Amino acid sequence: MSMTDEPLYPIAVLIDELKNEDIQLRLNSIRRLSTIARALGEERTRKELIPFLSENNDDDDEVLLAMAEELGVFIPYVGGEEHAKVLLPPLETLCTVEETCVRDKAVESLCRIGSQMRESDLVDSFIPLVKRLAAGEWFTARVSACGVFHIAYPSAPDMLKTELRSMYSQLCQDDMPMVRRAAATNLGKFAATVEAAHLKTDIMSMFEDLTQDDQDSVRLLAVEGCAALGKLLEPQDCVAHILPVIVNFSQDKSWRVRYMVANQLYELCEAVGPEPTRTDLVPAYVRLLRDNEAEVRIAAAGKVTKFCRILDPELAIQHILPCVKELSSDSSQHVRSALASVIMGMAPVLGKDATIEQLLPIFLSLLKDEFPDVRLNIISKLDQVNQVIGIDLLSQSLLPAIVELAEDRHWRVRLAIIEYIPLLASQLGVGFFDDKLGALCMQWLQDKVYSIREAAANNLKRLAEEFGPEWAMQHIVPQVLDMVTNPHYLYRMTVLQAISLLAPVMGSDITCSKLLPVIVNATKDRVPNIKFNVAKVLQSMIPIVDQSVVEKTIRPSLVELSEDPDVDVRFFANQALQSIDHVMMSS
């Protein structure tokens, strides 16, 4: 190929690859657009590559999505922001395709480019593009238009601003629900750029149109706009315009709309201030907590702690607590689970007396719930209650329920309790722990489920770290060593695991005098699985004990295992022997 033809080469390759049958090749060529643009240079990119992309957009959605993404970061390759407007035509076309994710990406890229364009180019090129999309014949263009108004509006002259507001108002009343949905979704962004004087008039009238829409999918998006608009308005305007809408929405005939209100309500409390919250929003929230649709109750229950934080404790006790009591015995397990995941956070909000009187009975009933998820959610947040009511009361009221759960028939509940034990131990202190929970920790080592036995071994290590080696030597090590003669090899394996975890915590002396003899003894076990695990444990002990012990005790045991008839036992024994040699070499 001659030198003169070379600059044409990248665009020729791109054209060939973009027309290839194989979608992967087409995708790859789009992903390499920036490389091709660099090869072509800024001017040829503007004059050849971008027009080619504008024409070549009748392709697979995946390729179009990649193109929309690439074009968003293309400003440096076309010569900087003064030439950014050349990127608008291909993106405008992508804004009208049928596939939603392509349109969304094209809108995102348009916003990114628009925010870097010079003001004069925005007025000359970007605003006309927005107007064309908003007046588009096909609904896809109008949907996309809603997402770019907030970029176009700030730099428009006053006459154009009036026109843009009127166009957005028409989109809010469009015949197609998809367009109205997009207008509702983007109203908050657009409102944030509109001047305060027009906010109360034009934007609020658009908002009112959307809130009275006959499609619930539009109304529920308008609910999301409530919080965004509430933050832009003064508190008194918020009370006048947004509050009545929210109160109405909390009684909407569509449960989806009520669900959105339940999710957003606590944000609105901050926007309207304490007085309207007490008079209007608390009754609305109580209605949602008692809604006849379980999904709405789930959303409302999940926000109960956040909502209570905004209120005075007296208000929360008076209005919200009765509902919480009802929800704790709700017919839907998901409602109870949502409540259990947040109810512990109410203890610091309500204070000690209210927690003891009102919340403790609810915690207990949820701890005894028939569904594991509900019980789990309570167990995992116990520390929040402990901070409020103190350990004595916690142990009297909740500990019996925890002990009951430690023997629960669902292994995941038992697992959650085990994982929580070290935290409980640090809160309860050593004396209390020995009385009530010590025996349980040993019992779990012989559980039928492997995950429980594994967690129980880890739990012993964490307890030894918490209470110290002397305590462990007295309360853990003897019981663990007694279990090494268990007739079932799986339980013997758990003991090996527990010993390997405890050894680093216990230190060299106890490991040599108490733990190592038991492990060496286990090399004579008749089950190969035990023997190769013994080899692994011996390998883990090499760094803990003295070099002389390694040579006198560990190496002979491993040599014996390395001659075992079982191939796995020989493999792990040899691996451990290599580890000893490696330590010897490095020392």
Image (cartoon, rainbow, N blue to C red):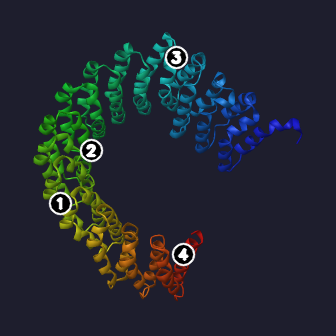
Cβ–Cβ under 8 Å for marks 4 and 3 = no
- Nearer the N terminus, badge 2 or badge 1? 2
Q: Amino acid at mark 4?
A: Ile
Across and down, in percent, residue 28 comes to 67, 46
Q: Which residue is mark 2?
A: 302
Q: Is residue 513 left or right of residue 384?
A: right
Depth order, front residue of 498/110:
498
Q: Is residue 365 left or right of residue 104?
A: left
Within 10 angstroms of label 1, few (less than 14), some, or many (20 or more) residues? Answer: some
Mark 2, secondary structure of its residue? helix
Report the quarter where the N terminus lies. Answer: top right
Report whether residue 24 is seen: yes
Q: Which residue is mark 1?
A: 399
Depth order, front residue of 308/437:
437
Q: Which residue is mark 3?
A: 155
Across and down, in percent, residue 531 comes to 45, 82
Q: CA distance from mark 4 to mark 3?
A: 74 Å
State the residue lying farthest toward the right.
Answer: 2
Mark 1, secondary structure of its residue? helix
